[in-house]
Amino acid sequence: MTRPSEPRGNNGGTGETEPDYRFTLANERTFLAWIRTALGLVAGGVAVHQLLPELADYGPRTALATIAIALAMILAAASYPRWRQVQRAMRRGAPLPRSGLLIVLAGGVLVLTVFAAVLVVTG
């Protein structure tokens, strides 16, 4: 059995090798986690807009829902290219690329949380 750090197989002379399947599957799980997070943000945005009329007036609720859904769109759009970059780096034995998604997600959740807290306190 090969160790996780040893690449396996050759990909037709392209200088790329097949990474250990555990790394490939871990990369796929990370991609799916980004997608689950995006779906959760969509569900949260729809729920705030449709199911919580007592939270705030229509405008602030719509703004909160729009921020959540916009963040979901960004995550969903960026998750596949991120998966592909990591997969390519693993195949080439290169360092993994840095991700701006972490900052976007953390900042977006912070904005959502502060906005929701303001609506709860003032409502």
Image (cartoon, grey):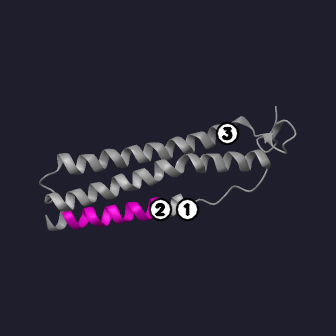
- Looking at marks 3 and 1 on the same chain, the residue that comes earlier in the sequence is marked by 3
Please state the extent of the stretch shown in magenta in the rendering: 104-119
Snapshot quadrant of residue 24: top right
Looking at the image, residue 113 sits to the left or right of residue 90; the answer is left
The answer to whether mark 3 and mark 1 are in CB contact below 8 A is: no
Seen at 40% across and 62% down, the residue is 108
- Cα distance between the residues tagged 2 and 3: 24 Å
Residue 103: x %, y % from top left: 50, 64
Residue contact at pointers 2 and 1, CB within 8 angstroms: yes
Characterize the local packing of mark 2: few (<14), some (14-19) or many (20 or more) Cα atoms within 10 angstroms.
Answer: some
Rounded to the nearest angstrom, the CA distance separating label 2 from label 1 is 6 Å
Name the residue rendered at 21%, 50% in the picture: 49
Q: Secondary structure at mark 2?
A: helix
Viewer-side label of 2, 3 = 2
Circle 3 sits on which residue? 24
Q: Which mark is residue 92?
A: none
> From this viewpoint, which residue is outermost toward the right?
13
Q: Secondary structure at mark 3?
A: helix
Name the residue type under label 1: Gly
Q: Which residue is mark 1?
A: 100
| Residue 113 falls inside the magenta stretch | yes
Residue 55 in the figure: left or right of residue 39: left
Quadrant including the C terminus: bottom left
Which residue was labeled with disc 2? 104
